[in-house]
Amino acid sequence: MSLMAGIFAGAAGTTALDIVTYLDMTVRGRPASVLPARAAGKLAERAGADLGSGEVAESRREGVGALLGYAVGLGVGGLYGLLAGDRNVPFPVAALGLSVAGMAAGDAPYTALRLTDPREWDAVSWASDIVPHLVYGLTTAVVYRRLTRP
């Protein structure tokens, strides 16, 4: 039950993260990040997977990049479910831990693939990454608690 509750909570958190991200894009008029698609392309290349060429390849990179994001969100939620189980983790600890874990799991591959360097980010870039991940952590913690507590 804890694993499934974590996965469902992670799905809710991922949806909340996406909503905040799309709201930010709408308000600031900024484009979507290219990092997920670039990471998908590099990973496919390393795996020897042919994504095609031209627009087909670009569409596949974007699709795989988005799917990887969902895998991270659901995976972090599921891992939390396994680790937390029936323990009564204090809500602030759960929310902050999930926020940090989600951000680290999402950003570490981009850094490892040398697609970005967080040491070079400005304050706006940090905020546009931190805020959605805080929402992810809060939402995931709330949903997990509601699913596992009577």
Image: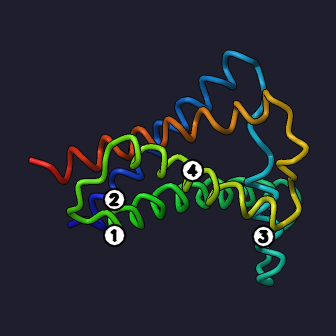
Q: Residues within 10 Å of mark 2 (few under 14, many from 20)?
A: many
Closest to the observer, 106 or 38: 106
Residue under numbered circle 2: 6
Left or right of 96: which side holds 88? Answer: left
Q: Amino acid at mark 1?
A: Leu
Q: Residue furthest bottom?
A: 48
Query: Which numbered mark, 2 or 4, is in the foreground of this view?
Result: 4
Residue under numbered circle 1: 82
Tag of residue 100: 4
Tag of residue 51: 3
Quarter of the image containing the N terminus? bottom left
In this view, 80 is above or below 18: below
C-alpha distance separating marks 2 and 1: 7 Å
x and y, in percent, of residue 25 in the image: 69, 25
Residue drawn at 79 percent across, 34 percent down: 125
In contact (CB < 8 Å): disc 2 and disc 1: yes
Q: Amino acid at mark 3?
A: Leu
Sequence order check: which comes first, mark 3 or mark 2?
Answer: 2
Q: Quadrant of residue 38?
A: bottom right
Q: Residues within 10 Å of mark 3 (few under 14, many from 20)?
A: some
| Label 2 residue SS | helix
